[in-house]
């Protein structure tokens, strides 16, 4: 459920956990150059029993970085589809084998794997053909920030700074 917060922000309730969306009433108490150090700082606050529901990690200077890992060919597309299809086929074969009586379990799993491998390769080749050569490379994307600020509700800023000063 989403409703208005008495502090003027948006309040989201998931089960019994309630969080306030970031508001302008926050003070930056620490800044880090990488996310893992910022995460470590918030974990330290939590370990020290600081009320972490008043903390936000805010990335600034965001960049989307796409790293190209190789060329996408029809063979590579078919192999990727075949491997995904193989596992899906094994799973289907396993389910069929579990709920079947009087059949060879391993044969059903093997046939599921074979059909999954073939179907995965065929569907991947079809999808590759539909790209028309517009994206013939494989890559992964990640979102990076220049800095990660630990921001705390202003009423808790002094306690957060004092606690973080003990972080080694």
Image (cartoon, grey):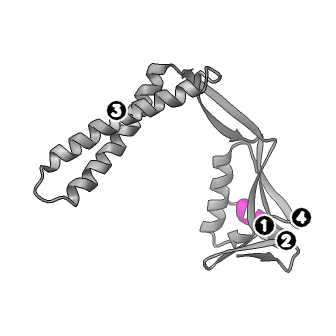
Tell me which corner region of the image, top left, top right, bottom left or bottom right, holds residue 57. bottom right
Residue shown at 69% from the left, 41% from the top? 143
Tell me which corner region of the image, top left, top right, bottom left or bottom right, holds residue 40. bottom right
**Depicted 47 relative to depicted 81: above or below:** below
| Residue 163 lies in the magenta stretch | yes
Q: Earlier in the sequence, mark 3 or mark 1?
A: 1
What is the chief secondary structure element of the magenta stretch?
Answer: helix
Q: Label 4: which residue?
A: 24
Q: Label 1: which residue?
A: 21
Q: Label 3: which residue?
A: 118
Mark-to-mark CA distance, 4 and 3: 55 Å
| Region rendered in magenta | 160-165
Say few, some or many: other residues with alpha carbon within 10 Å of mark 4 (under 14 / 14 to 19 / 20 or more): few
Mark-to-mark CA distance, 4 and 2: 9 Å
Mark-to-mark CA distance, 4 and 1: 10 Å
Tag 3 near tag 1, CB within 8 Å: no
Looking at the rendered structure, the secondary structure element under dot 4 is: loop
| Residue 5 lies in the magenta stretch | no
Say few, some or many: other residues with alpha carbon within 10 Å of mark 2 (under 14 / 14 to 19 / 20 or more): some
Looking at the rendered structure, the secondary structure element under dot 3 is: helix
């Amino acid at each position: 459920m989403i409703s208005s917060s008495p502090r003027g922000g948006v309040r989201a309730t998931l089960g019994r956990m309630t969080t306030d969306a970031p508001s302008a009433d926050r003070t930056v108490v620490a800044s880090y150059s990488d996310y893992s150090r910022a995460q470590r700082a918030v974990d330290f606050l939590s370990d020290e029993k600081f009320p972490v529901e008043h903390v936000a990690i805010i990335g600034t200077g965001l960049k989307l970085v796409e790293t190209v890992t190789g060329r996408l060919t029809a063979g590579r597309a078919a192999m990727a589809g075949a491997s995904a299809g193989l596992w899906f086929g094994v799973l289907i074969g396993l389910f069929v084998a579990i709920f079947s009586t009087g059949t060879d379990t391993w044969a059903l799993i093997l046939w599921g794997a074979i059909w999954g491998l073939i179907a995965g390769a065929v569907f991947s080749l079809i999808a590759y053909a539909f790209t028309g050569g517009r994206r013939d490379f494989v890559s992964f994307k990640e979102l990076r920030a220049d800095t990660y600020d630990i921001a705390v509700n202003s009423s808790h800023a002094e306690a957060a700074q004092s606690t973080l000063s003990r972080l080694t």
